[in-house]
Image (cartoon, rainbow, N blue to C red):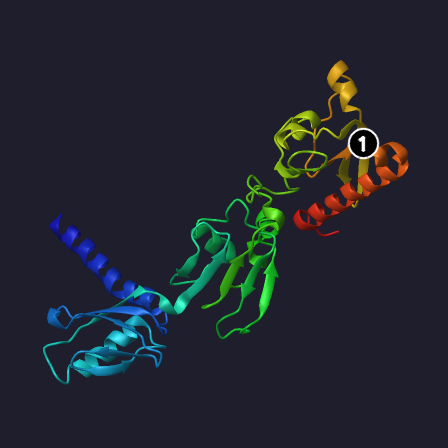
């Protein structure tokens, strides 16, 4: 039994000795990395050092030594070669990266925890945003900016629809992030909240729009079985000038749309016609009947102006929140 235990222990030790250096060898030390240098044979010489802008570190006894461009194991070997000239009792050293300063990315704007992000391997854009706490309620994931700040296309600005990539589960389509890039998550137009827009779902976005004579026009999360009246209530209800006799719903049908007209006064008083259940990306338009001399004297012109206003508002919302490919 003891022989088997010894054999297992020996295999485990061999695995640690041979596989760990291979794992460490995958990382290349860069400028601004923080390194821990340990000499178990001479702990008094243990140090934590930063890789300077010239790619070198400064160690006691040795002085300056180039670290950038080497793996931790290669640097450890180089350190032992140098220090053994002064102290022959030192035959081993361990180098670990305690802070990946060379792999830093800056995240700004509407994220929960803006600031610096550093990791041994820089992940994809969506992972970085999630690890910074995700976007805030008014963060615009459809218009994320990447400002190249490193050696790859320095100064170039790229706009990315992160939400579309996540919704379609095509994270591979997101641009690669390089060290010293700046990621900016802007605020949505007018601060309209995007809370509830699922970034993990597939297919059509699960939202609806309410524009016109309501208290809070905007974009809202579509709940199952939601009717027009409830949807308008979610938008704060109608204004006193709202024309409930002709509420319109623009419903997407491929590249076109179907327009439905409802007499909400009649529906709420008599319960007819059958309740319309909203579909993803439906747009509810509540017309304003207007007040005063203008409305009474020029009813046709009033309706044209009101309709033009709702059309423009709808167009702005759809342009902002519904950027889909034909």
Query: Residue 254: where, in percent of width, then height?
Result: 77, 43
Q: Nearer the viewer, residue 315 or 165?
A: 315
Horizontal placement of 183 versus 266: left or right?
left
Horizontal placement of 166 versus 313: left or right?
left
List the single residue furthest toward the top: 270
Query: Residue 270: where, in percent of width, then height?
Result: 76, 14
Secondary structure, mark 1, is strand
Q: Nearer the viewer, residue 254 or 88?
A: 254
Residue on which disc 1 sits: 260
Q: Nearer the viewer, residue 49 or 231?
A: 231
Using the rendered view, name the quadrant where residue 93 is placed: bottom left
Using the rendered view, name the quadrant where residue 286 is placed: top right
Horizontal placement of 284 versus 168: left or right?
right
Residue 91 lies, with reference to residue 132, above or below; the image says: below
Query: Residue 235: where, in percent of width, then height?
Result: 64, 33
Report whether residue 175 is seen. no
Residue at (62, 37) in percent of width and height: 220
Report whether residue 143 is seen. yes
Using the rendered view, name the quadrant where residue 279 is placed: top right
């Amino acid at each position: 039994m003891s022989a088997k235990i010894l054999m297992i222990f020996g295999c485990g030790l061999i695995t640690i000795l041979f596989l760990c250096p291979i794992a460490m060898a995958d990382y290349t030390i860069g400028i601004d990395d923080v390194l821990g240098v340990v000499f178990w044979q001479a702990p008094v010489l243990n140090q934590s050092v930063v890789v300077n802008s010239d790619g070198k570190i400064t160690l006691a006894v040795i002085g300056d030594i180039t670290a950038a461009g080497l793996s931790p194991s290669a640097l450890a070997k180089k350190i032992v070669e140098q220090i053994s000239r002064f102290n022959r009792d030192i035959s081993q050293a361990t180098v670990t990266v305690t802070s990946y300063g060379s792999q830093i990315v800056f995240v700004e704007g509407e994220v929960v925890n803006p600031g610096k992000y550093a990791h041994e391997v820089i992940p994809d854009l969506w992972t970085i945003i999630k690890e910074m706490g995700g976007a805030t309620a008014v963060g615009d994931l459809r218009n994320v900016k990447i400002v190249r700040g490193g050696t790859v296309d320095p100064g170039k600005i790229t706009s990315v629809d992160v939400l579309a990539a996540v919704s379609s589960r095509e994270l591979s389509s997101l641009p690669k992030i390089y060290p010293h890039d700046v990621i900016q998550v802007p605020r949505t137009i007018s601060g309209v909240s995007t809370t509830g827009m699922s970034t993990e779902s597939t297919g059509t976005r699960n939202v609806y729009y309410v524009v016109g004579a309501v208290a809070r026009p905007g974009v809202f999360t579509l709940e199952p079985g939601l009717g027009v009246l409830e949807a308008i209530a979610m938008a704060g209800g109608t204004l006193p000038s709202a024309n409930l006799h002709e509420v319109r719903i623009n419903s997407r049908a491929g590249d076109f749309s179907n327009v439905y007209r409802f007499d909400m006064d009649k529906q709420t008083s008599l319960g007819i016609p059958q309740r319309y259940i909203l579909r993803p990306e439906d747009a509810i338009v509540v017309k304003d009947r207007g007040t005063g001399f203008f409305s009474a004297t020029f009813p046709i012109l009033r309706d044209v102006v009101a309709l033009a206003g709702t059309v423009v508002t709808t167009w702005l919302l759809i342009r902002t929140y519904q950027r889909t490919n034909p």
